[in-house]
Amino acid sequence: MFIDGSAVLQEKTIVIAGATGDLGTRIAGHLLHRGARVRALVRPGNTSDKTANLQAKGATVIEVDYRNHAELVKACAGGTCVVSALSGLEEVILDAQTALLQAAVEAGVPRFIPSDFAIDFTKLPHGTNRNLDLRQEFKERLDKAPIAATSVLNGMFSDLLTGQAPVVLFPLKRVVYWEDADQPLDFTTIEDTAAFTAAAALDAATPRYLRIAGDVLSARGLKEAASQATGDQFKLLKAGKLGRLDKIIKFTRTVFPQKEEVFPAWQGMQYMRNMFSGLPILTPLDNNRYPGIRWTTVQEVLAQHVQQNPK
C-alpha cells in the first residue's frame, strides 16, 4: 500500500545496512517515497555513485565500522526499525549482522528485519545450502534477542531467470528442470521485494515471517511464460533427478570449491536443488498485506529481457 507522507510516517526513521547494494538501494528508495526518514549505513570510505544518489534522494548516509560497537549504537539510535540488506558469507551474515543486531538492541530500536530474502530456509535440512545455513544460524541468534523480528521470504529473485540462473535457456528455447516439471516454484522480482520490505519496515505489527511470491510457476509454467514472452515455442528439458544433481553439486564443490565466493556455481545448484525438492515452498503467502503493491509476473520479466536484448 503506497502510503502518503503523513505526519505519523514522517516521524519513522528506518536504518538500512547494505543500503548501497541492489536490494538495499531499492528499499531505501521505496521508504523515501513513502515519506520515511532513511539512515543509510555504509562502510568507511564508500564513495560510490549509489551513496551520492541516496543522499540526493534525501537519505542520511552514515559511515560505520561494524567492529566499532559505539559507532553502530549511535547510528541506530532513534530508529524505529533496522533493515539489513547485507550480502556476504560468515563475516557478513553472522559477524557484521550480529554486531548490527546487538547495536540495535542497545539503542532501543524496537524492530529488526534481517537479510533473509530467500526461499523458506527454516524448512531445509542443515547442510543442503551453505548460504542459507548461515541465515539459519543468524536466525537462532535473532530469536534469542530482546527485539521484534520479521523475516521477508520471497523465493528466488525472478530477475535471475534472464541469465544468472540456468533455467530459461533463450538460445535453445528450453526450460531446464530437475525431478518434477510440475513442482511449484516461488519467484519475486528484486523491485517487488524491496517495495514489500519497505512497507513491512513501516508496519509496527508484522509477524515473525512474511512470505511473498510475485509468481508461482512450475517448470511447465515457466515454459508457457517463456513462450508467451518471446513468441517462440519453448520446450522442457529434464536434467535428471535430484540424486543426480546432488552428485554434480558434490563434484563441482570439490573441484571448484571457491570458498570465498558468495555465489559460486555450486551454490546456485544448491538453491535449485532446494527449490525443486518442494520443501521450501512459501505458504501461506502474504501478498495482500499491502494492497498497493502490483506484483510483477515471470512472463513480464522475461518479456522485458527480450525487449532489451532483441535478436
Image (cartoon, rainbow, N blue to C red):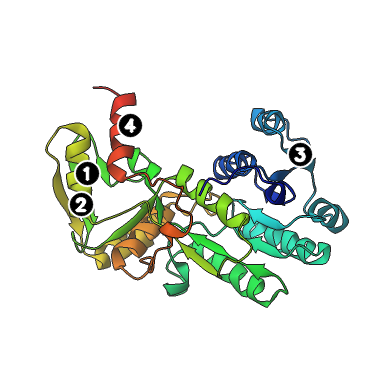
Q: Quadrant of residue 139?
A: bottom right
Among numbered discs 3 and 4, the one appearing first in the sequence: 3
Q: Secondary structure at mark 4?
A: helix
Looking at the picture, how far across and down is residue 278, in whole percent?
Answer: 30, 68
Q: Secondary structure at mark 2?
A: helix
The residue under label 3 is which amino acid type? Answer: Thr
Looking at the picture, how far across and down is residue 204, in whole percent?
Answer: 64, 63
Distance between mark 4 and mark 1 Cα atoms: 12 Å
Q: Residues within 10 Å of mark 4 (few under 14, many from 20)?
A: some
Who's the residue at 17% across and 39% down the image? 227
The residue under label 4 is which amino acid type? Answer: Gln
The residue under label 1 is which amino acid type? Answer: Ala
Looking at the picture, how far across and down is residue 91, in whole percent?
Answer: 67, 57
Residue behind mark 2: 221
Q: Secondary structure at mark 1?
A: helix
Residue behind mark 4: 304
Residue behind mark 1: 225
Check whether the beta carbons of the residues at disc 1 and disc 2 lie within 8 A of each other: yes
Who's the residue at 16% across and 50% down the image? 237
Distance between mark 2 and mark 4 Cα atoms: 18 Å
Check whether the beta carbons of the residues at disc 2 and disc 3 lie within 8 A of each other: no
